[in-house]
Image (cartoon, rainbow, N blue to C red):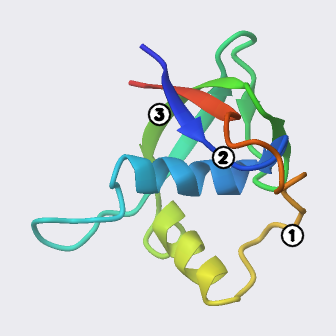
Amino acid sequence: AFEALPMPGTAARLFDVKRAIVRAKKLDRSTVGPQLEFDLSVKNASTNEEYEDESMLLPRGTRVVVQRLPAARGYGLLARIARAEAGMHTGTAPVPFGNVAAAKSGFYEINSR
């Protein structure tokens, strides 16, 4: 089953899509013990192509399959999100998100396994 992931604009960086998935699925909130480091594998649902470059722009309407993977301490997605929000380098070049004034009807569809 695919779920809609509302995102502004006509395209979004893979990093921003991953961050939106983390927030939508509340993967950034640990209820017991320390948070485990993880990353998300994101593949095109039609072609099975894995998206690895987090600065890559994904067009609105892209259907993706997402899988949670283990990551080394300090190198997981939550650590990269925290560095990005603190204004630190995340390892990807900043890329604009497309037309932010676009209608909010655009979405990404994700299938979590």
Give the number of the disc on residue 67.
3
**Which mark is in front, 2 or 3?**
2
Residue hosting label 1? 94
- On the image, the x and y values in percent for residue 69 come to 44, 44
Total number of numbered discs in the rendering = 3
Q: In the rendered structure, which disc, 3 or 1, sits on the residue that comes first in sequence?
A: 3
Most foreground residue, 60 or 67 = 60
Q: Amino acid at mark 2?
A: Met
Q: Which mark is residue 7?
A: 2
Q: Secondary structure at mark 2?
A: loop
Q: Position of residue 44 (x, y in %)?
A: 70, 22
Q: Nearer the viewer, mark 3 or mark 1?
A: 1
Q: Disc 2 versus disc 1: distance between alpha carbons?
A: 17 Å
Dividing the image into 4 quarters, which one contains the C terminus? top left
> Which quadrant would residue 19 be assigned to in this image?
bottom right
Q: Is the residue marked by circle 1 packed among few (<14), some (14-19), or many (20+) residues within 10 Å?
A: few
- Quadrant of the image occupied by residue 87: bottom right
Secondary structure at badge 1 equals: loop
